[in-house]
């Protein structure tokens, strides 16, 4: 059995060593700081604390309560949120709690379709999505402007008035530009619809004041995961109005969470404190890097979406790659070159006979490479690597150059104690 354990740790170290030589461009990933990792290793990972602070079902929670209250306090300050719940164990769980608090099975929700950036947690029943298959919501889709990669405001207003949904949901997994929350939240209130916003991808940019502030623009509930542009642990969080706080809390526990991964709550509190200190500079550089990467790819001939709008205002870049086969082929080819990103559906893919296994696009994010200290000049070099592979240069040759390039970027930035990004566990 010890041999099996040794092998597991060898695999972990092989992964760490590999990622030291890679360009991590998956938009839903980031790195945690040494302080966040230390909190994750605490004894909190062994404990239970069902219920709210001060109202636990378990004993032994006096310090657990203090840490959770500190996480709530920091989140309120960082986001200007009247009420915060830090107990969801993921962004999907946060969305399910939000559905539970604001709707009943059979109610209608308007959100983005998956090919236009919607997340699987927003999906219809027939697609197995959380909203439809788990909570039983009827799903209607926002009218979408494919050229601008955003919701069509006038048609969306018409649809809200026609459908009279119980809930309208902004946000998604492909999220290049702020959504028209201010305009459409007013229409939603005309028909007594609740307004929510899935900020899983952009919550770190919101914390750093580099994206829209959905609570200030009319959203009543903001859900998120905490490990994308917010460089915390894999966990979830909900921000909401004071009025909806009790309903959200009841929906989280006992609705969708029992114990809520207490070491992750502690780690989230540390990450929020780091964002209070470094968030604005980090988020600003993350967006600048995304725009620089998009521009460099575009100037080298790739079909980067939305050039007329400056490509992006978030951490994400979306590229159509059908001239090179499809997104699945490109994803695999670039992985061989130590460039890690993901294939991605484009809004028109289903009409053209493609699906999620062989979509027309790839999606990139700059959150992790920014944490590694890279700036605009490095984005140009990354674009060069990508284009060379797509235009036929051997992936293995480029992989060696990527590994050499990465030697200068092994330290975490925008945190209290800069440390090694990919720490070896067992050598």
Image: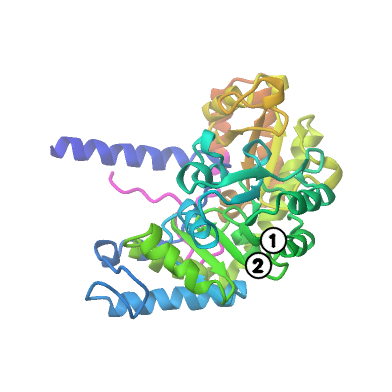
User: Which residue occupies 84% across, 47% down?
Assistant: 309
Instruction: Measure how far apart labels 2 and 1 are at the Cα level.
Output: 6 Å
Element under disc 1: helix
What is the span of residues highlighted in magenta in the rendered image?
A: 405-427
Above-or-below relation of 396 to 258: above
Element under disc 2: helix
x, y percentage for residue 425? Answer: 31, 49
The numbered dot on residue 284 is: 1
How crowded is the residue under tag 2: few (<14 C-alpha within 10 Å), some, or many (20+)? some
The numbered dot on residue 235 is: none
Residue 406 inside the magenta-drawn segment: yes
User: Which residue occupies 52% across, 55% down?
Assistant: 104
Query: Would residue 27 be visible to someone looking at this image?
Result: no
Compare residues 9 and 239 and report the one nearer the observer.
Answer: 239
User: Which residue occupies 26% across, 72% down?
Assistant: 57
Pick the quarter of the image with the C terminus. Answer: top left
The numbered dot on residue 280 is: 2
Which residue is outermost to the right?
A: 308
């Amino acid at each position: 059995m010890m041999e099996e354990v040794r092998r597991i740790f060898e695999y972990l170290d092989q992964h760490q060593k590999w990622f030291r030589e890679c360009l991590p461009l998956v938009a839903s990933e980031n790195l945690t700081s040494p302080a966040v990792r230390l909190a994750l290793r605490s004894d909190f990972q062994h404990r239970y604390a069902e219920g709210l602070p001060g109202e636990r079902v378990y004993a032994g929670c006096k310090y657990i309560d203090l840490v959770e209250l500190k996480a709530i306090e920091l989140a309120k300050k960082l986001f200007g949120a009247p009420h915060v719940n830090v107990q969801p164990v993921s962004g999907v769980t946060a969305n399910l709690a939000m559905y539970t608090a604001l709707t009943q099975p059979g109610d209608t929700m308007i959100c983005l379709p998956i090919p236009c950036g919607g997340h699987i947690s927003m999906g219809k029943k027939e697609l197995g999505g959380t909203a439809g298959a788990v909570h039983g919501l009827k799903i209607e889709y926002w009218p979408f402007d494919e050229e601008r990669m955003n919701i069509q405001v006038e048609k969306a207003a018409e649809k809200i008035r026609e459908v009279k949904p119980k809930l309208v949901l902004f946000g998604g997994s492909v999220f290049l530009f702020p959504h028209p929350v201010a305009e459409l939240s007013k229409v939603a209130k005309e028909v007594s619809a609740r307004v929510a916003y899935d900020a899983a991808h952009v919550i770190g940019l919101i914390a750093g004041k580099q994206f829209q502030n959905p609570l200030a623009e009319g959203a009543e509930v903001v859900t998120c995961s905490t490990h994308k542009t917010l460089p915390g642990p894999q966990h979830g969080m909900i921000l909401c109005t004071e009025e909806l706080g009790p309903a959200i809390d009841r929906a989280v526990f006992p609705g969708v969470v029992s114990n809520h991964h207490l070491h992750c709550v502690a780690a989230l509190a540390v990450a929020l404190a780091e964002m209070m200190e470094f968030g604005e500079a980090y988020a600003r550089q993350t967006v600048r890097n995304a725009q620089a990467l998009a521009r460099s790819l575009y100037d080298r001939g790739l079909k980067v979406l939305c050039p007329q709008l400056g490509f992006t205002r978030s951490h994400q870049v979306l590229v159509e790659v059908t001239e090179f086969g499809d997104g699945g082929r490109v994803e695999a080819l670039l992985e061989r070159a130590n460039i890690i990103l993901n294939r991605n559906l484009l809004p028109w893919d289903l009409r053209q006979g493609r699906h999620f296994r062989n979509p027309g696009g790839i999606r990139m994010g700059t959150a992790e490479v920014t944490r590694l200290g890279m700036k605009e000049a490095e984005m140009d070099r990354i674009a060069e690597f990508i284009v060379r592979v797509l235009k036929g240069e051997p992936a293995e040759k480029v992989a060696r150059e990527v590994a050499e390039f990465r030697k200068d970027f092994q330290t975490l930035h925008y945190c209290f104690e800069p440390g090694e990004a990919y720490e070896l566990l067992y050598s």
